[in-house]
Amino acid sequence: MSQYCRPFQLLASFLCCFLVFVTANKEKINQRDYQVCAGMYSKEDWKGKVNPFISFNLKKISGLSIDSDPGIIVAIYDFQDFEHLGVEMSDGEMYYVCDDYAVDTGLCEEEDRDKFIIQDVVYDPYTSANRSRANPIMTFSQNEVGLHDVSYPVTETGFYCVTAFKSTGSTKFNAVVNFRNAYGHLAGTEINKLPLYGLLAVAYVVAMALYSFAFWKHKHELLPLQNICWPFSCF
């Protein structure tokens, strides 16, 4: 009699191998994991109802030293522009944030205080030539909980990152970055798999139909355990 449960066992194994749980393309970021990246499609490359964007939502922050503490310093950028973040010091170390020291030493301007230091042109060691930014870099500071009022518009397909540095050693924070594509909330790495998901859905329906037919054909020979298998397979 156990032979009638074999289709169910095969189906269960099949689903365990290929089932994918899809959620909105949102990533968490904090003082320990301070950088997240994701692939994004432009609206021209993959049609949709909205213009793709990246938003930053600060959920929790603590440990601010004073009321004027900038809290966290955030940069949203195309990954190929990562070399434009920060400036190299005389000792070879990189300095990323425009703070009091950076302003006093001329690394950045006063109007850029509490933001990432951004260079418009950098030297590319791979091509031995200067290189400009491929896309705009958005940088800001935030010390209050809530959604930042400006989102980063994605106009070109690429791999985009969000980096957040805390302004002081005692600062702790939790935030959510929303990588919103034009077609919906599905991650950019998953959208090309939609035909595969459709094929798997058809395969599931066919397997379920065959199993249901075998169940009905031998319904008078089934054991109680086999009667339990069928509802679970439908679920």
Image (tube, helix red, strand yellow):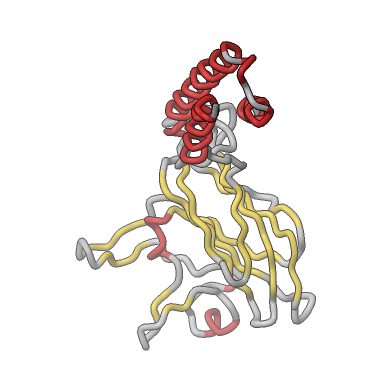
Q: Name the quarter where the N terminus is drawn.
A: top right
On the picture, is 133 further left or further right than 117?
A: left
Q: Which image quarter: residue 93?
A: bottom left
On the picture, is 130 further left or further right than 142?
A: left
Which residue is at 56% across, 48% downward? Answer: 152
Q: Name the quarter where the C terminus is drawn.
A: top right
* Residue 40, percent from left and from top: 47, 43
Q: Is residue 146 above or below residue 195?
A: below
Which residue is at 45% across, 66% downward? Answer: 85
Q: Nearer the viewer, residue 61 or 227?
A: 227
Which residue is at 29% across, 67% downward? Answer: 123
Which residue is at 59% across, 31% downward? Answer: 50
* Residue 104, percent from left and from top: 54, 84
Q: Which image quarter: residue 74?
A: bottom right
Q: Is residue 231 above or below residue 118?
A: above
Q: Is residue 100 above or below residue 194?
A: below
